[in-house]
Image: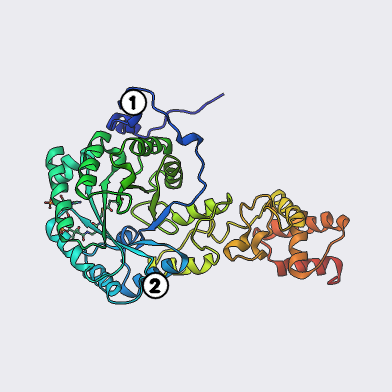
Amino acid sequence: MNRQQPSPMPSHRYRDVFAKVPVPRPIQGAPVARTWPDNRITTAPLWVPVDLRDGNQALADPMDPERKRKFFELMVAIGYKEIEVGYPSASTTDFDFVRLLAGSDLVPPDVTIVVFTPARKDLIERTVESVAGIRGDVVIHMYTATAPVWRDVVLRRTRDELAAMIYAGSEHIQRLAGDNVRFQFSPEVYNLTEPDFILELADHLTKQWDATAERPVILNLPATVEVATPNVYADQIEYMHQNLPRRDGVILSVHPHNDRGTGVACAELAVLAGAQRVEGCVFGNGERTGNVDIATLALNLHAQGVDPMIDFSDIDRIKDVVEYCTRMPIHPRHPYVGELVYTAFSGTHQDAIRKGFAVQGPGFWEVPYLPIDPADVGRGYEAVVRVNSQSGKGGIAHVLESVYGVRLPAEQEAVFARHVQEYTDRTGREASAAELKALYEEVYGCSN
Ligand SMILES: CC(=O)SCCNC(=O)CCNC(=O)[C@H](O)C(C)(C)COP(=O)(O)OP(=O)(O)OC[C@H]1O[C@@H](n2cnc3c(N)ncnc32)[C@H](O)[C@@H]1OP(=O)(O)O
Ligand SMILES: CC(C)C(=O)C(=O)O
């Protein structure tokens, strides 16, 4: 029986997304195929790290030039082909960094640089100035908030006035930009904006920017603040996928944040729903609870047999650079990269892992409790089993054997485990491999 009581929390002050904005399915008024639940992800989308812009704007101490460069070089080295490098009109650091890229050979010919700008004439001009002389492809990414609360409270413009401001910005960019420039637009807080307004803007912008398959326009639909369960975002993306004008000339992109802790789910469902491009940050830095973690997204693909097209085979090197540049530690339980994510302390898990390792051959990876082989990301096996009072005989025997080559006879495992149990209960903490060995020698008077 459920004995839960109403809480004193003022939940009545909040409304769900359906009360705030038309969610695509109902406004269509007719059943439309919702295909995303049956789709599968079989190839990696185009990843676009925004660590140097969205991630950077969330840091107490924004990256200095040396950190920006280090981060950029890392992203190039591991395989990203489109990288948002900054908000050049925001600061001299950002502007100068883009100038550094323009005047050096840091950008390989197959890498596209993205620069970010609001729809304001002076700031657009500064942005265009920053990319002058870049020989390779450049994307100029313009954004404006389009959601009703932002229109009314922040920008104080009607829908029509806001559309006019956006079109003035997009025309200005087009007038100034060179032939190597492609265009991107983000209606900020897409997930709280009326879908018909987005279609109206997309129609105008793709016409004006002459969207074609050869020179596509990027329409990026951000969940700037997550507000609903991921299936709602998937419906919102699929609606655009099915209804966008000049669809062949549009790269449909998503940019989830993680306010509800479901950024990864939103991105994955959005890809099922037709998104071709995903913006986020490596390990999920970003405003508030972060941008979607594009390392987790990539390694989720890897764990399902799909090549992520980004090289995470030395994940600790990537972790070191990200921690250095953001000056923030990565949580020990962070997916794929956390210090503890390939470690079992509990007895039955250790037993299963030990048995799994014993039969694992060169074929498909099937070790229980380890979704991927730690070696794939450059981790060793030493930390897979660690012993404390929650551990069992299998885990203890595994540590002694794998670290010291000490193999306990089967009947001795259970007996020795009781000694370890008594020891770890008494100390109240983890027993290192060296402590286990010392205890073994104490109990059996030898080192086997
Ligand atoms: C969801 C996102 O991540 S959006 C990106 C957010 N990132 C940043 O803000 C980091 C960099 N920003 C900055 O350096 C500064 O905010 C600047 C240089 C862009 C502008 O600075 P300022 O001129 O001092 O203005 P301020 O920071 O107060 O911004 C508010 C003004 O911008 C306007 N504005 C906000 N978004 C936009 C937009 N996309 N296009 C045009 N104007 C905009 C607001 O309406 C407001 O104008 P008002 O003063 O006339 O009411
Ligand atoms: C404007 C976009 C791309 C953004 O950063 C956001 O909505 O979070």
Task: State the SS at label 1.
Answer: helix
Question: Which residue bears the numbered disc 2?
Answer: 70
Location of residue 275 in the rendering, given as x and y in whole percent from the top left corner: 39, 45
Q: Nearer the viewer, mark 1 or mark 2?
A: 1
Task: Work out whether mark 1 precedes mark 2 in sequence or the reverse, and give the earlier one.
Answer: 1
Please state if 258 lies on the left or on the right of 20 as rendered: right
Q: Which image quarter: residue 86?
A: bottom left
Residue at image mark 1: 26
Residue neighbourhood size for the residue with mark 2, other residues' Cα within 10 Å, grouped as few (<14), some (14–19), many (≥20): some
User: Residue 308: horizontal and vertical position, in percent?
Assistant: 51, 56
In the displayed orientation, state which residue is furthest to the bottom: 104
Q: Which of 400 and 372 is in front in this view?
A: 372
Res 223 visible = no
Does residue 163 sit above or below 330 in this rendering?
above
- Mark 2 beta carbon near ligand 1 (under 8 Å): no
Q: In this view, does 103 lie to the left or right of 299?
A: left
- The kind of secondary structure element at disc 2 is helix
Q: Residue at x 45, y 58 (%)?
A: 283
Q: Is residue 410 shown to the viewer in this render?
A: yes
Residue closest to the eye, 199 or 19: 199
Dot 1, how many residues are within 10 Å of its Cα: few (below 14), some (14-19), or many (20+)?
few
